[in-house]
Image: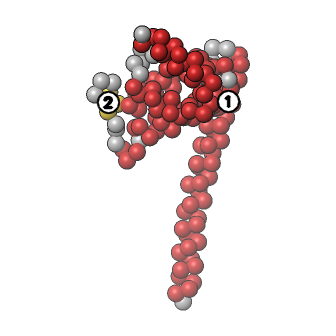
Amino acid sequence: MKELVNLFIYSVLISLVDFILLQLVQALRYEPLEDSSPLLNFLIKRSCSDGKIATTFYWHLRVTLFLSSAIMNKVEVDVNRGPIGEFYQTCLQRFQESITETADGQEVYEKILEQAAFRDLLKHLNTKIKPAKKADKMKVFFINKQ
């Protein structure tokens, strides 16, 4: 019976995946991580067939991974699974392995990596700009004091 219900749910999800992808990524934490995880297998298969969904899925996994393991140096732990961050890291690795199996998937993954490199560049530029703004505020403060 459970398999029949899951089959129905996944058939409905195919049409809704664009709209509820973030919630599905967050729901992964309640799925078994083995190869038989229907939700993870579904999301990876769907992502590998659509570049837009693949990109969104990758970034949702990255953000969820970051939020699960890095906020205030606090590691969130699931009693049955261990650190949640490690779980999402494994999901991300499985996605990366699957998407790079085809030429189209490899092309999509290269674009995702370009996005990540661009994000890192913006992050680097932001750290360069912030101290300059603070220094400018200090100059204004001391000029106004005189």
Residue occupying image coordinates x 52% and y 13%: 7
Q: How far apart in space, not on screen, are marks 2 and 1 (Cα)?
A: 31 Å
- Nearer the observer, 45 or 58: 45
Farthest residue in the bottom direction? 146
Query: Residue 138 appears at what percent x and percent y?
Result: 53, 75
Name the residue beneath numbered marker 2: 78
Quadrant where the N terminus lies? top left
Query: Residue 66 appears at what percent x and percent y?
Result: 46, 38
Quadrant where the C terminus lies? bottom right
12 relative position to 39: left or right? right
Measured along the vertical axis of the image, is residue 63 above or below residue 39?
A: below
86 relative position to 25: left or right? left
* Residue type at tag 2: Asp
Residue occupying image coordinates x 41% and y 37%: 68
Measured along the vertical axis of the image, is residue 100 above or below residue 139?
A: above
Farthest residue in the left direction? 79
Name the residue beneath numbered marker 1: 52
Residue occupying image coordinates x 48% and y 16%: 6
Residue 43: name its quadrant: top right
Query: Residue 59 appears at what percent x and percent y?
Result: 57, 35
